[in-house]
Image (tube, grey):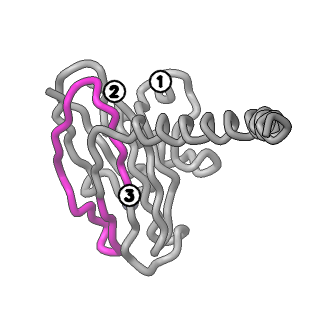
Amino acid sequence: MKQLTTKLFAAALTLAPATLFAQSDTATTEKKEAKKADQEVAIEANDQMQFNKKAFEIKAGDTIQLTLKHVGKLPKIAMGHNLVILQKGTNLAGWASKAMTAAATDYIPVDEASKKAVIAKTKVLGGGETDSITFSIKEAGEYQYLCSFPGHFAIMQGKITVK
Ligand code: ZN
């Protein structure tokens, strides 16, 4: 009987590291779930050069997961869409006109001031594609977003109200 107890004890010791490892795995998974966005926003862009959402509201400091879906059929080269969120007070038309010529960098201007004005951006999408981004804005106020694909921003823009 004593021998059996010893054997079981030894078995438990052998198992211990594996058990600990399994527990830490679980902990990591839980942490990831806890980090889930505070708010999810879904926006669609189409072949008619439109966002289906022209405004939304978020809470300052919240983690926002924004998903842009191109629900059209046209390829990226003809009807590409992205969604770029700009810092408060950015001159939208000025920023967008620089973006027009920045094809090599996915229509994000490369000069420092223009880059700094970007809070968050999705990839440029073609029909059927989707991209998700996560961001958070600390300061309350009104922020603008746009599609920076050439010729789109005048119609494809919207407003984020941060409270
Ligand atoms: Zn667009």
Mark 1 residue element: helix
Q: Kindly indicate whether the residue at mark 1 contacts the one at mark 2 (C-beta within 8 angstroms).
A: yes
Q: Kindly indicate whether the residue at mark 3 contacts the one at mark 2 (C-beta within 8 angstroms).
A: no
In the rendered image, which residue does mark 3 sit on? 68
**Is residue 11 or residue 153 the one in the foreground?**
11
Q: Residue at x 38, y 77 (%)?
A: 72
Residue 89 visible to the viewer: no
Give, as a three-letter code, the residue at label 2. Gln
In the rendered image, which residue does mark 1 sit on? 116
Q: Which mark identifies residue 48?
A: none
- Decide if residue 88 is on the left or right side of residue 84: left
113 is higher (above) or lower (below) than 157: above
2 is higher (above) or lower (below) than 129: above
51 is higher (above) or lower (below) than 39: below
User: Spatial distance from mark 2 to mark 3, Cα to Cα?
Assistant: 19 Å
Mark 3 residue element: strand
- Decide if residue 108 is on the left or right side of residue 33: right
User: Spatial distance from mark 1 to mark 3, Cα to Cα?
Assistant: 22 Å
On the image, the x and y values in percent for residue 99 come to: 48, 43
Residue 60 visible to the viewer: yes
Q: Residues within 10 Å of mark 1 (few under 14, many from 20)?
A: few
Q: Which mark identifies residue 87?
A: 2
Magenta span contains residue 73: no
On the image, the x and y values in percent for residue 36 come to: 39, 41
